[in-house]
Image (spheres, rainbow, N blue to C red):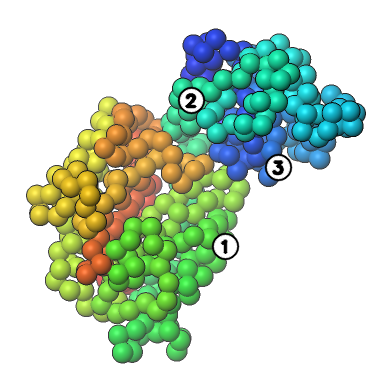
C-alpha cells in the first residue's frame, strides 16, 4: 500500500515546520499507517516531504528494514544511545538521540498529534527542537479514504465476521427452550458461551476479538452493554461483532438482532421500523452527501413513527440514542462520522450503517452493515441475511 501523504506535506507547509513526528507503538493506528511497521514497543517515525524515516531499537532493526515503508531506518545505537544514557540518564539520553536523529534529516521543527507524549515533546524542546501540535489530526483524516487494497483488507475482516455470525446464529437456531431459557447441548446457553463460539470462529478465520457484544433483553437496551448470563426465549438478542484481522490489522463490523421463540408485536414493529431506517440511510449514501444527511434520513424515519431520537430530544434515554455510523479501518471507530456533525462522504470512505432502537421495557434492536462509498453510490461489503428469527 502506498498512501497519498500529500495532505500531510501541505499541513506541514501551512504550519511552517520541517517534519511530522510520532513516538508510539503500532497499537497507535496513525503510527502503523505512517510507518507501515508493526511493533509493540514505542518507536519514532519522522515524516518530511522528502521521505519517511524510522528510529528503532536494535531488536527491531532487521524487521523494520524489511517490513516498514520507511525510506531509511536508523538504530538507537547509531547515535551512541548507551553512552548518552550513561551520561544523562535513560530519559534524557533518548531525547538527545531523537534530537540527533532529527538533525541528521535537517529537521529543526516538528508538528505532532494531540496525543503525542508530553515527556518526549518537552525533552526535544530542551534539546532545541521546536515541537507544536497540529490543529487537526491530518493522518487520521488521510486514513479515512481507503485504497483498493485497504478496502479489500476490510472486506476480508468482514468475511471472518460473517463466518462468526453464522456460527452464532446456528447455535441460537439449534437451541431448545426450557422455562423461558435457551439450552444448547443440554446446558444453559449464556452470552458468554455464544461469545466463545464467535471468538473461536474468528480465530479460525485469521481474526480476533475479545469484546464481542451478545446482549439479551434489557441488556440489549444499552447500545454498548456487552451482555452476560443466560439467554432467554422471546427476547431480542443483539450480536455485534467487530473483529480485527490478525495480519492486516483492519477491522470488520456487523450487528444482527435475533429472537428465539416468538417475538412480540412490539418487537416486530421496532425491527421493521429499524430496517426501514437502515434502508433510508443506504439510499442517502452517495459521493458528496454528508454523514449528517445520512444520519438525518434515519432520524426522519424514526421520528415519523413516533420514536425519540437525540435530534428531537437530546436528553432521550430510549429510542434512537446514538449516531447512525462511523468510519472503520485500522481503528474500529475512525473518520468519517455518520452523525449530526458528519462531513462530506467521498469515494473510498468505508462506514458502518447501524440504526437501532432501545428501551429496557422492550429490549434493543440494531441492524448494521459495512459499506464503501463509490464514485456512483456505495457497495455493501456485508453478505449476510437480515432476519429476526434465527435460522
Q: Separation of disc 3 and disc 1 at Cα?
A: 27 Å
Tell me which corner region of the image, top left, top right, bottom left or bottom right, holds residue 296: top left
Comes first in the chain, label 3 or label 1: 3
Q: Which mark is residue 138?
A: 2
Q: Secondary structure at mark 1?
A: helix
Nearer to us in this view, 179 or 42: 42
Tell me which corner region of the image, top left, top right, bottom left or bottom right, holds residue 326: top left
Q: Which mark is residue 299?
A: none
Query: Would residue 362 be visible to someone looking at this image?
Result: yes
Task: List the residue tagged with mark 3.
Answer: 41
Nearer to us in this view, 20 or 206: 20
Tell me the quarter of the image containing the N terminus: top right
Q: Separation of disc 2 and disc 1 at Cα?
A: 36 Å
Q: Secondary structure at mark 2?
A: helix
Q: Position of residue 231 (x, y in %)?
A: 37, 77
Nearer to us in this view, 226 or 251: 226
Amino acid at each position: 500500500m502506498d498512501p497519498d501523504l500529500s495532505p500531510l506535506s501541505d499541513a506541514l507547509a501551512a504550519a511552517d515546520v520541517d517534519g511530522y513526528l510520532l513516538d508510539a507503538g503500532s497499537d497507535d493506528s496513525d503510527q502503523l499507517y505512517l510507518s507501515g511497521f508493526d511493533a509493540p514497543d514505542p518507536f519514532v517515525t519522522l515524516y518530511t516531504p522528502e521521505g519517511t524515516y524510522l528510529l528503532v531499537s536494535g531488536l527491531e532493526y532487521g524487521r523494520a528494514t524489511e517490513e516498514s515503508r520507511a525510506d531509511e531506518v536508523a538504530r538507537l545505537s547509531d547515535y551512541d544511545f548507551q553512552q548518552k544514557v550513561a551520561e544523562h540518564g535513560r530519559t534524557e539520553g533518548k531525547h538527545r538521540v531523537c534530537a540527533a536523529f532529527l538533525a541528521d534529516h535537517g529537521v529543526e521543527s516538528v508538528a505532532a498529534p494531540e496525543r503525542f507524549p508530553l515527556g518526549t515533546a518537552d525533552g526535544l524542546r530542551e534539546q532545541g527542537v521546536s515541537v507544536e501540535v497540529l490543529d487537526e489530526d491530518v493522518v487520521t483524516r488521510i486514513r479515512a479514504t481507503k485504497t483498493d487494497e485497504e478496502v479489500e483488507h476490510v472486506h476480508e475482516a468482514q468475511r471472518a465476521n460473517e463466518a462468526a455470525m453464522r456460527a452464532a446464529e446456528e447455535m441460537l437456531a439449534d437451541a431448545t427452550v426450557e422455562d423461558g431459557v435457551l439450552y444448547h447441548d443440554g446446558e444453559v446457553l449464556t452470552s458468554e458461551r455464544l461469545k466463545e463460539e464467535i471468538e473461536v470462529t474468528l480465530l479460525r478465520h485469521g481474526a480476533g476479538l475479545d469484546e464481542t457484544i451478545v446482549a439479551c433483553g434489557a441488556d440489549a437496551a444499552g447500545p454498548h452493554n456487552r451482555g452476560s448470563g443466560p439467554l432467554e426465549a422471546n427476547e431480542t438478542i443483539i450480536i455485534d461483532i467487530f473483529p480485527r484481522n490478525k495480519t492486516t490489522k483492519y477491522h470488520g463490523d456487523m450487528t444482527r438482532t435475533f429472537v428465539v421463540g416468538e417475538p412480540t408485536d412490539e418487537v416486530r414493529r421496532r425491527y421493521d421500523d429499524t430496517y426501514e431506517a437502515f434502508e433510508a440511510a443506504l439510499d442517502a449514501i452517495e459521493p458528496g452527501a454528508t454523514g449528517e444527511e445520512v444520519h438525518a434520513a434515519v432520524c426522519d424515519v424514526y421520528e415519523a413513527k413516533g420514536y425519540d431520537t437525540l435530534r428531537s430530544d437530546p436528553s432521550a434515554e430510549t429510542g434512537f440514542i446514538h449516531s447512525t455510523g462511523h468510519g472503520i479501518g485500522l481503528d474500529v471507530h475512525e473518520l468519517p462520522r455518520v452523525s449530526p456533525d458528519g462531513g462530506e462522504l467521498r469515494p473510498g470512505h468505508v462506514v458502518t450503517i447501524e440504526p437501532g432502537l432501545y428501551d429496557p421495557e422492550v429490549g434493543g434492536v440494531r441492524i448494521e452493515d459495512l459499506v464503501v462509498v463509490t464514485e456512483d453510490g456505495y457497495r455493501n461489503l456485508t453478505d449476510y441475511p437480515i432476519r429476526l428469527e434465527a435460522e
